[in-house]
Amino acid sequence: MRYGVIFFLFLGHVLWAQQSGRIETDRPDQTECPFIVKKGYFQAEIGFNRASEARQIHYLLPTSLLKVGVHPLVELRYTVLHEPGSGISNESFGFKAHLFKEKGFIPRSALIVQYHVNQDHRDQSELNSIPHSIGETILTFQNSLGGPLGIGYNLGAEYHSDGAVEGIYRIAPNVNLGKRGYAYAEIFGRFPQSQFTDHWIDGGLAYYVSDHIKADVSAGKSLRTSDSWYVALGISFRMRLW
């Protein structure tokens, strides 16, 4: 999978086709966007993360969200997170479906449904008290606030193998920086409160290299644990398949 993604990054420029509007991505913030990849197009959103948890440094190289537009209102999604040297590879399959266009105070919205591939090392046990996440549903919204300002926000639920359900919230106001860039700040986390519940703040910058390529940088920190943080670089691109 990693080599296939790198191959697309180097050779994809010869396959660009015209598509109205700029590429819209779910990265770099945690808040998923409500835009759908155009039918017949492939889109890759690649991240390179360095994170600290319990004073241990981890690398995710790369994190990959791959999408294909299969209908004007539906995209298929595949996510993989790989930690070099650990053999850990968390995978998700799902789809995003358009619900409403933005109109006045009504936000542009979409529904995301994802299934997380079950892996034994993530299941609840005497060695791991955090239950395995088997899937999630997320409602994603976006409003224009006038001028260069906008806001994206999500509300959803994550389902665990022990029957528990956690709420998900994400809020990310943003501002355009000239014609090609934007900045955002974000707060996200889960509820109800438990010993595993965490809330984070983060922020970042994104730059449109072209209508088809977008680069980003971001960083975030836990509000509960002082030594939990991450920094990330990302690149996203799209190409026509049919």
Image: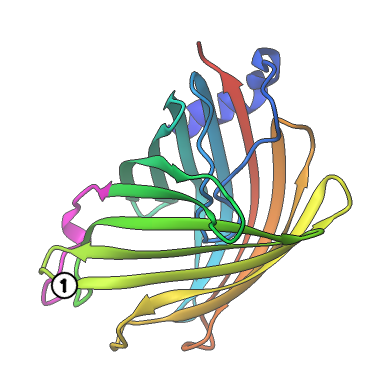
Residue 172's quadrant in the figure?
bottom right
The image quadrant where one finds the N terminus is: top left
Three-letter code for the amino acid on which mark 1 is drawn: Ala
Query: Is 205 positioned to the left or the right of 11 in the image?
Result: right
Instruction: Give the image location of residue 42, x and y in percent.
Output: 51, 25
Q: Is residue 35 above or below residue 217?
A: above
Residue 122's quadrant in the figure?
bottom left
Q: Is residue 234 visible?
A: yes
Q: Is residue 235 above or below residue 60?
A: above
Whether residue 4 appears in magenta in the rendering, the answer is: no
> Coloring scheme of the render?
rainbow
Q: Is residue 90 visible?
A: no
Which residue appears farthest toward the front when viewing the image? 104
Residue 35's quadrant in the figure?
top right
Query: Dot 1 corresponds to which residue?
Result: 164
Q: Nearer the viewer, residue 11 or 140?
A: 140
What residue lies at 29% left-to-right and 65% top-to-bottom?
157
What residue lies at 52% left-to-right and 78% top-to-bottom?
200
Q: Secondary structure at mark 1?
A: loop
Whether residue 126 appears in magenta in the rendering, the answer is: yes
Instruction: Give the image location of residue 72, x and y in percent.
Output: 46, 27
What residue lies at 49% left-to-right and 22% top-to-bottom?
39
Part of the protein shown in magenta: 115-127
Instruction: Give the image location of residue 45, x and y in percent.
Output: 56, 41
Judged by its main secondary structure, the magenta piece is: loop
Q: Nearer the viewer, residue 159 or 139?
A: 139
Instruction: Give the image location of residue 136, x and y in percent.
Output: 29, 57
